[in-house]
Amino acid sequence: MSIEILLDEAGHRREAGADDEIIERSVLLAQITGGPATVVTAGTGMRLRAQAAGLHAVRLPEKCRKDQG
């Protein structure tokens, strides 16, 4: 298992929405590494958009959600 950190390339313009930016960067990461990228989220909408973009997406476990104190 590894965590990849990408710095924005010169001229990169961030997406208006944070979810869209995360999905776009995850797709780029998968292309660069040639391996899978997984998006972990509590949001059903983001999970579906990530899957539509060809990413592996999983639901954040309830015990890890910040609202579960």
Image: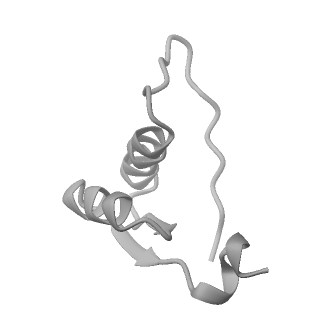
- Residue found 48% across the figure and 46% down from its top: 22
**In the rendered image, which quarter is residue 48 located in?**
bottom left
Name the spot of residue 8 as percent of width and height, x first.
59, 27
In the picture provided, is 6 more to the left or to the right than 11? Answer: right
Pick out the residue farthest to the left.
52
On screen, residue 52 above or below 63: above
On screen, residue 61 above or below 55: below
- Residue found 66% across the figure and 76% down from its top: 65
**In the rendered image, which quarter is residue 50 located in?**
bottom left
In the picture provided, is 63 more to the left or to the right than 49? Answer: right
**In the rendered image, which quarter is residue 68 located in?**
bottom right
As rendered, which of 52 and 8 lies closer to the eye? 52
As rendered, which of 1 and 42 lies closer to the eye? 42
On screen, residue 35 above or below 24: below
As rendered, which of 15 and 5 lies closer to the eye? 15
**Disc count in the image?**
0
Q: How is the image coloured?
A: one colour
Name the spot of residue 1 as percent of width and height, x first.
62, 77
- Figure quadrant of the C terminus: bottom right
- Residue found 54% across the figure and 78% down from its top: 60
Name the spot of residue 28 as percent of width and height, x first.
41, 43
Name the spot of residue 66 as percent of width and height, x first.
72, 71
In the picture provided, is 10 more to the left or to the right than 67? Answer: left
Pick out the residue farthest to the right.
69
- Residue found 27% across the figure and 56% down from its top: 49
